[in-house]
Image (cartoon, grey):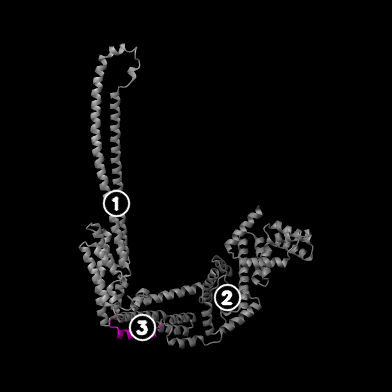
């Protein structure tokens, strides 16, 4: 589809350029145009046929409209349509500056909803004030109880209940911290007792050590005085020196027991200290997580335009955590929420005043702004339904004005402007009215220029101006008169169909190719003629591709390949004079190869397969990359060996269908030629 759109676009461009050249008497060479068209990836164009003297002015006009403009559904037509739509919307935006393009569905629902009971709204506001007062007095539980009452109101949407649950979660976190603090106090008492016991045990062990040392010294002196006595008794009791003294054993055991008790008390102290540290860290994490969660919840309330609840939540944070100052982001949100609450209350009063003065433009803007800032504000629930419906009617009128501008229905637009200026005191219709007048003047001026161009014989320019005038103001009453002057003629489509049938019957495919846009419009919807048009265009395209390939091969000094390319194309379209002329020119330069192929074909037709195979081999020796020679050798070899062979006509038909399915360019052809040369050299 994209390739077809590109072909149509290039054809339009070249058709217009060629028409200008025909007027100035200049003509381009067919080969040069074919090369440009091939470079653009499309079928080459030929010189456009000049209009005959018998062609009427109206026929030329219709030919321009249907043959040279972008067809419906083409890329150019779609691009123009999109550009026109964007430009029209820009005009509407400029004319209705400050008016929203579309009404928000939620705001529209609010405008049509009934107002709330003033007594309920007043009770809700009093409860809010009472809750704030409780928080200032540090009465958190009373404030929480009020939150559960506030959650019962329909417009509160149970947000107060959620806030109360969040506050209770904070209280639970505080209680967990208090429990951990109590555990730490118990652990600290254990640490104090363990330290006291350790000190007492250390003192006792120290005394035991001193007594043990004193007794050791006394025993040493006694041992020196009794050495002689012990030596005399050695013969009677030789093992007495190795037996410990009972007193020494008792003192050693007492010393060890004292040290073990001291170590036990020390480890108790370390365990208690570790538990205290873990509890302190857990308390820090609990408080940090609680603060973070509550701060995020306040941000959610603020972003959700629950400004009253955001202020209450900030007050709860100050009371529960006792910091005095709020975090920077939370303080900013609480301050902004308080400002918005006060602003909405003031905007509602201003809105009611403007409605009473029939200043609906300003009133609508104020109410829309207030609703966009805080759609859940209780003051907005008190706005009377009749007043809101006036805003809805005004916005609907603005939307109708926008639609009229985009549809360029300036007649209805002018009457609508007059009505709005009479009904709405602050409505300014200066910009829309200036737009209407400017477009009307432009349309009339375009029609005048179209008539002047038609009188001077410049039909193309006249039709361009006529089209611009109709696009500027489609309902211009002068368009009917102008259209009658341009389009009162016979059915051009029938003429195009007759001309197409004659050209197709005469196999004048090049004429069909030159006027393909006109014929494409004429045969649209006729399946048979569409197939015939497609066949003619594909035939011409294949022929032009072959001519271009031959030109490239000839430029590369390959006359054999050039002649063969034209010969293959001529087999599909033998009546084309351009192919026949080119084939004859190339046959002179490739006479040896042409003669060999011709003799091989004649022998194959007469059934002399051996003789034909010989000449095909001779042709292959002169041009190894020859398709005709290689296929002939393969075909005659199969015949000689008795293998099944595809008939020549069937083979041509198969090649023709495969060539129609493939899209190729001159660059691809050059690459193919180079590959063939490499294969031949190999």
Asked whether residue 678 is drawn in magenta, I would say: no
Of badges 1 and 3, the one in the foreground is 1
First in sequence, mark 2 or 1: give its number.
Answer: 1
- Image coordinates of residue 71 in percent, x first then y, are 52, 76
Marks 2/3: CA–CA distance: 42 Å
Q: Do residues under tags 2 and 3 come within 8 Å of each other at their CB atoms? A: no
First in sequence, mark 1 or 3: give its number.
Answer: 1
Asked whether residue 420 is drawn in magenta, I would say: yes
The residue to which callout 3 is attached is 437
Q: Is residue 559 left or right of residue 120?
A: right
Give whichever of 17, 161 is nearer the camera. 161
Q: Residues within 10 Å of mark 2 (few under 14, many from 20)?
A: many
Question: Which residue is located at x 27 percent, y 53 percent?
Answer: 178
**Residue 628 figure quarter:** bottom right
Q: Can residue 556 be seen in this view?
A: no
The residue to which callout 1 is attached is 284
Q: Do residues under tags 2 and 1 come within 8 Å of each other at their CB atoms? A: no
Q: Residues within 10 Å of mark 3 (few under 14, many from 20)?
A: few
The stretch of residues the image draws in magenta is 409-427
The residue to which callout 2 is attached is 516
Q: In this view, does 297 lie to the left or right of 610?
A: left
Question: Which residue is located at x 34 percent, y 13 percent?
Answer: 236
**Residue 617 figure quarter:** bottom right
- Image coordinates of residue 456 in percent, x first then y, are 47, 83
Vertical placement of 251 versus 183: above or below?
above
Question: Which residue is located at x 24 percent, y 17 percent?
Answer: 221
- Image coordinates of residue 479 in percent, x first then y, are 45, 86
Of badges 2 and 3, the one in the foreground is 3
- Image coordinates of residue 603 in percent, x first then y, are 77, 63
User: Could you tell me what secondary structure mostly forms the magenta stretch?
Assistant: helix
Q: Can residue 139 be seen in this view?
A: yes
């Amino acid at each position: 589809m994209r390739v077809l759109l590109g072909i149509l676009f290039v054809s339009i461009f070249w058709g217009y350029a060629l028409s200008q050249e025909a007027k100035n008497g200049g003509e381009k060479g067919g080969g040069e145009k074919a090369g440009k068209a091939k470079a653009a990836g499309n079928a080459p164009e030929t010189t456009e046929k000049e209009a005959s003297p018998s062609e009427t002015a109206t026929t030329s006009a219709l030919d321009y409209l249907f043959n040279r403009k972008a067809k419906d559904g083409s890329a150019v037509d779609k691009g123009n349509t999109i550009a026109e739509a964007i430009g029209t919307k820009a005009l509407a935006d400029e004319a209705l500056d400050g008016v929203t393009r579309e009404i928000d569905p939620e705001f529209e629902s609010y405008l049509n909803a009934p107002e709330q009971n003033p007594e309920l709204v007043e009770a809700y506001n009093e409860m809010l004030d009472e809750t704030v007062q409780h928080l200032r007095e540090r009465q958190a539980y009373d404030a929480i109880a009020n939150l559960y009452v506030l959650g019962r109101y329909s417009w509160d949407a149970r947000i107060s209940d959620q806030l109360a649950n969040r506050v209770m979660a904070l209280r639970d976190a505080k209680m967990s911290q208090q429990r951990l603090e109590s555990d730490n106090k118990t652990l600290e008492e254990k640490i104090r007792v363990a330290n006291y016991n350790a000190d007492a045990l250390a003192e006792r062990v120290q005394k035991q050590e001193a007594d043990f040392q004193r007794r050791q010294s006394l025993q040493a002196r006694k041992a020196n005085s009794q050495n002689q006595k012990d030596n005399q008794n050695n013969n009677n009791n030789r093992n007495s020196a190795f037996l410990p003294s009972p007193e020494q054993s008792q003192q050693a055991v007492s010393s060890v027991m004292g040290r073990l008790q001291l170590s036990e008390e020390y480890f108790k102290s370390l365990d208690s200290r570790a538990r205290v540290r873990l509890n302190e860290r857990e308390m820090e994490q609990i408080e940090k997580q609680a603060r973070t969660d509550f701060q995020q919840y306040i941000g959610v309330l603020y972003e959700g335009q629950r400004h009253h609840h955001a202020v209450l939540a900030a007050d709860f944070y100050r009371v529960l955590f006792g910091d005095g100052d709020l975090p920077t982001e939370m303080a900013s949100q609480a301050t902004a929420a308080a400002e918005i609450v006060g602003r909405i209350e003031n905007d509602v009063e201003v809105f009611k005043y403007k409605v009473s003065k029939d200043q609906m433009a300003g009133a609508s803007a104020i109410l829309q702004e207030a609703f966009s800032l805080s759609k859940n504000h209780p003051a907005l629930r008190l706005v009377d339904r009749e007043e809101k419906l006036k805003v809805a009617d005004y916005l609907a009128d603005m939307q109708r004005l926008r639609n009229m501008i985009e549809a360029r229905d300036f007649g209805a637009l002018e009457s609508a402007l007059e009505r709005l200026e009479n009904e709405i005191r602050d409505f300014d219709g200066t910009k829309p009215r200036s737009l209407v007048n400017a477009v009307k003047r432009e349309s009339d001026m375009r029609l005048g220029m179209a008539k002047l161009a038609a009188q001077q014989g410049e039909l193309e320019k006249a039709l361009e101006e006529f089209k611009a005038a109709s696009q500027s103001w489609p309902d211009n009453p002068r368009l009917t008169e102008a259209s009658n002057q341009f389009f009162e003629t016979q059915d051009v489509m029938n003429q195009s169909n007759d001309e197409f049938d004659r050209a197709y019957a005469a196999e004048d495919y090049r004429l069909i190719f030159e006027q393909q846009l006109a014929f494409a419009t004429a045969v649209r919807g006729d399946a048979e003629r569409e197939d015939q048009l497609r066949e003619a265009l594909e035939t011409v395209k294949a022929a032009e591709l072959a001519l271009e390939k031959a030109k490239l091969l000839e430029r590369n000094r390959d006359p054999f390949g050039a002649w063969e390319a034209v010969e293959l194309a001529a087999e599909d379209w033998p009546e084309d004079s351009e192919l026949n002329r080119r084939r004859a020119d190339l046959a002179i330069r490739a006479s040896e190869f042409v003669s060999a192929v011709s003799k091989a074909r004649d022998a194959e037709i007469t059934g002399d397969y051996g003789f034909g195979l010989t000449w095909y081999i001779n042709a292959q020796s002169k041009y190894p990359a020859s398709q005709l020679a290689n296929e002939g050798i393969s075909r005659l070899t199969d015949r000689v060996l008795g293998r099944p062979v595809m008939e020549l006509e069937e083979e041509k038909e198969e090649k023709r269908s495969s060539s129609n399915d493939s899209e190729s360019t001159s660059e691809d052809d050059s690459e193919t030629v180079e590959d063939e040369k490499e294969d031949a050299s190999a």
